Image: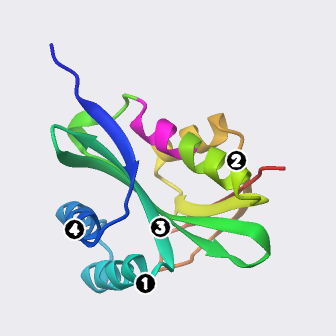
Amino acid sequence: MKFDFGFKTIDSEKEIKTAINFIRDFPLGYEGYMDWTEKVYCQLMNGEKSGIVAMSEGKIIGDLIYQNLDKGILELKNLRVHSSLGRRGFSNFMMNQLEIESLISGKEGILLDTREDNMPIRNLLEFRGYDIISKEKLYDDKIDVSYFKKLK
């Protein structure tokens, strides 16, 4: 059995395009999703957002997209791993990398939201010490859970 996995920061136009194509291949099923991916592409290109990708055999198998907010807070905007490779620790590794880089750069915390029924990510967040700060309808009629982790 061969394992060929790596993680890197998205730092070129080619990598941004490849990451966006990966995100588009696994839509989340909400209205305006493709428009959102186009906006994320532009924000990655102009530096408003940043990302980390998980790679295997030269292909993206997971992504983590984030942005800086005011007052030293990062907001995690997108985290996914190809469904065939779930539950192998890729999301946990990318989250850990984001937290370490955030601490090094002086960030105070990380904010994010997820669907209330997304138990795999909710379990990961709670395992990693994220606290629930709200439950509300943020995007549509479904309940979203917002989490925050203080880093300092």
**Which residue is denoted by mark 3 in the rendering?**
50
Q: Residue 48, image x and y in percent?
A: 51, 80
The residue indicated by pointer 2 is: 130
- Determine whether, in the image, residue 121 is placed left or right of residue 21: right
Look at the image and give the residue range highlighted in magenta.
89-95
Q: Amino acid at mark 4?
A: Lys
Of mark 2 and mark 4, the one earlier in the sequence is: 4
Residue at which label 1 appears: 46
Q: Nearer the viewer, residue 41 or 140?
A: 41
Identify the residue position indicated by label 4 in the image.
Answer: 14
Let me know if residue 145 appears in the view: no
Quick check: 93 above or below 23?
Answer: above
Q: Which amino acid is tagged 2?
A: Tyr
Mark 2, mark 3: which one is toward the viewer?
A: 3
Which residue sits at x=15%, y=13%?
1
Q: Disc 2 to disc 3, how far (Cα)?
A: 21 Å
Mark 1 belongs to which amino acid? Answer: Asn
- In what element is the residue under mark 4? helix
Tag 2 secondary structure? loop
Neighbour tally class for label 2: few under 14, some 14-19, many 20 plus, Cα within 10 Å? many
Q: Residues within 10 Å of mark 4 (few under 14, many from 20)?
A: few
The answer to whether residue 50 is left or right of residue 105 is: left
Q: Nearer the viewer, residue 25 or 140?
A: 25
Which callout, 1 or 2, points at the residue further toward the start of the chain?
1
Marks 1 & 4, CB-CB < 8 Å contact: no
Q: Quadrant of residue 124 in the image?
A: top right
Find out whether residue 136 is within the magenta segment: no
Q: CA distance from mark 2 to mark 4?
A: 33 Å
Q: Mark 2 or 4, which is nearer the eye?
A: 4
Q: Which label's residue is closer to the chain start, 1 or 4?
A: 4
